[in-house]
Every structure is written in structure tokens, then in C-alpha cells.
Image: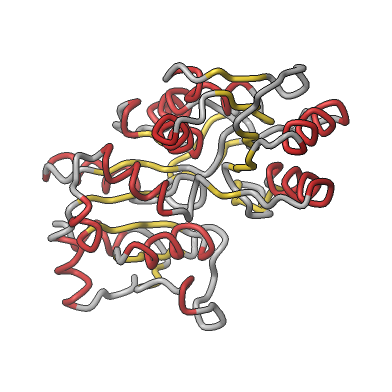
Amino acid sequence: MTVLSPDHVARLRDAAGFIFDMDGTIALGDAKSGGHKALPHAVALLERLRQRGTPYVIFTNGTAKAPADYAASLRNAGFTVDDAQMLTPSASAAAWFAAQGLRRVRVLGNAGCAAPLRAIGLDVIDPSEPAERVDAVYTGWFREFDFAALEAGCDSLWHGARLFTASNVPFFATATGRAIGSSFAINAMLTAMTGKRARILGKPSRVAFDVARQIMGLPRSAAGAMVVVGDDPALEMRMANGAGAMAVGLTTGLMKSASDLPQRDRPGVLLDGLEPVLHALA
């Protein structure tokens, strides 16, 4: 077990709130059940935070399901997680679109990807649906992507819509190894055809961090006292470092070493599992 420094222990104990990644951090997708399997010490750690009264959210970069569906899957795996504690990039995107007055959004994603946008009353346009006056094109989990959706997305972008995405990383961790992120491929096609680059509204964006902070009821001044825990240096570590939060990296998913990472993607501490964090909060 990795031994944390006294400074690390103090930051963990005094944390204003925690943002946890899901896949590769607290759980892994279980192909047999279609749900999740908890990683060692993850259930106990979240329960300890609940007992301490320390707020936390779980922020997956996946948009295959609505947040409530992910929360239900984690509860089936033994976690005590409320629907409101589960976030996806579509949750942060929905809040940001509403704040910016972008009401008509073409979603190149499945029903789970679009659900948070529909839930707050945005006008969601289906992938290949003919539409005028589209404010934004938003990409997410969409294994059903086809040529009709490509043409419709390009048409909206050519007529002035702005391009946004849930995620632009090529891979994510599963129980059987890494899997391809569909939005990465879709973004590459849209950019090649239109010249527009997608703005990320999921991790590692400050939009995602701030929505998570607000969900926990924390002020902007609390950012430096927050902790972000994850396995992807380009997502959780970059997001934490950009916001001044403590970056706790794990080798249970995509990240195996920090020595060859650029500074913005390096964890403040790299652990082999969650047990040291659990002990720090004893």
C-alpha cells in the first residue's frame, strides 16, 4: 500500500468535496451483467465520506446512459449513491447550454446522451432530423452513428451552429481493457468536413468542474480545497490541476505511471488503489 505524506493526508481530511471518476476509479463495467463491479475499497470510501458529511459526486465521462441509470447501476454494485450525485458530460453541457441561451441543440448521441438536455427543457434535435436555426451540435456516445447523421451535423455546422462535445479522448477503461470513445471519432469527422473544432463540456473542462462543485453546494473559492480522483491523466488530472484542486491518480485504469506525463496531466499523488485514501479519512 502506498503511504501518503502528512500533507496529502491533511488535504484529504480537510477536503471541501470530492469528484470521483467512475470507470477505472471506483468501478469497472461488468460485461456479464451489463452493470458495474466495485473496485476494492471504493464502496467503503464513499460510505466513509457520507458518514463524515463530506460532499462528493461521481462524474463519468460516459454518456451512454442517463445519470440516473448510471447511479442505479452503481447501487446494484453496492454503492450508496443518490441520482443527484451522479454526473455525466451531458449534465454539465445541459447546464452550460441553458446559461448561454443555446436552446436548440442537435445531439449526435443516443437517448442517454440527450436525456439531461431534455430534462431541463432544451429543444433537442435528433441526429438526422431536418432542422433550421440550430444553435449547437453536441456529440456523445453514439455507436449507431451513420452517414445521415454526419450529413445533418455538417449541415447544421455549415449554417452557423457551434460544435460541442461530451468528450474528446480516444479511449476509456473497461473490465476487459480499453474501449474506443465514439465522440472522439465523430468529432474528427465533423472537424475534417467543416473546419470547426469541438469545445469540450465534459472532463477536463472547467465547465464540468464547476457544475460538479455547484452540485455539491460549494462556492467558487472552495476549488483549491477540493479533491479529484481518477485514472485518466488527460481527464481527471488535467481538470484538477486546471482548477487548483488536489489531483489523486490511480493505476487501476488507464494510468500506470506519471513520469512521462506533461505537468498539466500529472497527479499530485499516484496510488495503486483507494485504500490509502480510506485510511487517511479514518
What's the residue at 48%, 55% (across, down)?
A: 204
Q: 134 and 273: which one is in front?
A: 134
Q: 27 and 122: which one is in front?
A: 122
What's the residue at 77%, 44% (across, down)?
A: 190
What's the residue at 30%, 66% (across, down)?
A: 244
Q: Write down the quadrant of residue 218 in the picture.
A: top left
In the visual, does 9 lie left or right of 174?
Answer: left
Q: List x then y, in percent, for residue 13.
A: 14, 60
Q: List x then y, in percent, for residue 50.
A: 18, 39
Given the current orientation, which residue lies at the most extreme bottom position?
259
Above or below — where is 192 with respect to 273? above
Q: How many marks?
A: 0
In the visual, does 54 lie left or right of 38?
Answer: left
Looking at the rendering, in which quadrant would you find the N terminus?
bottom left
Q: List x then y, in percent, for residue 219.
A: 18, 48
Q: How is the image coloured?
A: secondary structure
Looking at the rendering, in which quadrant would you find the C terminus?
bottom left
Given the current orientation, which residue lies at the most extreme right position?
147
What's the residue at 49%, 39% (across, down)?
A: 89
Q: List x then y, in percent, for residue 98.
A: 43, 29
Q: 114 and 39: which one is in front?
A: 114
Above or below — where is 14 with respect to 60? below
In the visual, does 194 lie left or right of 182?
Answer: right
